[in-house]
Amino acid sequence: MWRSMIARRMDVHDARSAESACTMSIATCMTILAAALALNSPCVVGGGYGGGGSALAATTLQGQEIDPTVPRYRPGMHRPKSRIEGATRGVESSELLVLPLVPDHVGLTIAGQPVLYWYLSKLTTSPIIFVLVDTRSVEVVHDVTLSPQPQPGVQLVRLTDLGIVLEPNVQYRWYITVVTDGQSPSRDIVSGGMIERIRPESILSPLPAPDSTIAAVRFYAENGLWYDALASISDLISSAPKDRLLRRQRAALLQQVGLQEPAEWDLRQAATE
């Protein structure tokens, strides 16, 4: 009966893709379905995070001037909003926030096996599940329980590690679900976004060299390739974790798509390095 109730509130595509998007209990699937109901705008599942919305013209973050040379994300055609943001209910000090590091629309990549980034505000012992759904076939491509995260902050899922290759011109939904209470799936924290791989020849400008550089980050961002821009700047940070400029530049990139808390986390890391 719950399937028919959801189907009446969603289009067939969203209902089927969300329903397929796990091999967990029906109740946990219901949580993901409920999250998909609000995809008209970035939504919060389970709590009160006030993020969302683009801020492409913003020039400051936490009162700090942003370098005008930072990467500027310029998405192409208008795409439907699709970001899901998850948070626990409760007092602010105990809130667990889970955010996909994606724009509030379908993000693009030219990589066959991109890296998907997400943010965890604090450590948790709860199981964390990753699910990837092919919206064309409305079937689960992969679902897996992730290894415990050693520290809070920016996290990642490497599709290479999972043996997943995205097909060109196909939109995928991906979810990160924190199972906070096995007896009460409605308390699960569900977050996620969308991704589409496009062919490199659709980019008019010559592609940069394969190694990550600030120039490559700017190129990807200005050509609307969100996932490639974020991966490139993140690779640079991994190679030089004490480089404050790189942290500030990633923070500025995140802030441009309304991801304020992860941006502030990056700035705090820059201040303590």
Image (tube, rainbow, N blue to C red):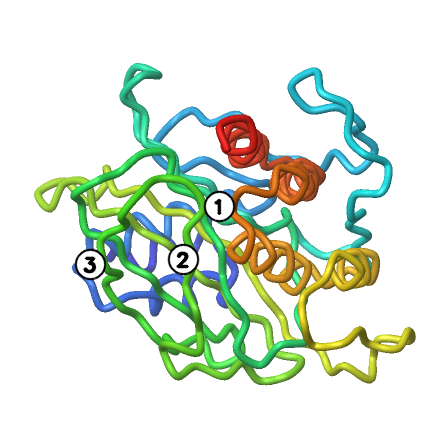
Q: Distance between the residues labelled 2 and 1?
A: 8 Å
The N terminus sits in image quarter? bottom left
Query: Image quadrant of residue 185?
Result: top left
Marking on residue 250: none
Q: Is mark 3 on a helix, strand or loop?
A: helix
Q: Within 10 angstroms of label 3, few (less than 14), some, or many (20 or more) residues?
A: few
Residue at 64% in and 61% down: 232
Look at discs 3 and 1 and give the one toward the viewer: 1
Task: Name which of mark 3 and mark 1 comes first in the sequence.
Answer: 3
Tell me residue 66's x, y (percent).
77, 30
Instruction: Name the residue: 51% across, 66% down.
Output: 115
Front label number (2 vs 3): 2
- Measured from the top left, where is residue 200 in percent x and y? 77, 81
Query: Picture quarter containing residue 8?
Result: bottom left
Q: What residue type is labelled 3?
A: Ile
Q: How crowded is mark 2: few (under 14 residues within 10 Å), some or many (20 or more)?
A: many
Residue at 77% from the left image edge and 60% from the top image edge: 224
Amino acid beneath label 2? Tyr
Q: Which residue is drawn at 57% across and 85% down?
A: 167
Q: Which secondary structure lies at badge 2?
A: strand
- The reply to whether callout 3 and callout 1 are in contact (CB within 8 Å) is no
Is mark 2 in CB contact (under 8 Å) with mark 1?
A: yes
Question: Residue 26 got which mark?
Answer: 3
Pointer 1 local density, CA inside 10 Å: few below 14, some 14–19, many at least 20: many
For the residues labelled 2 and 3, the Cα–Cα distance comes to: 16 Å
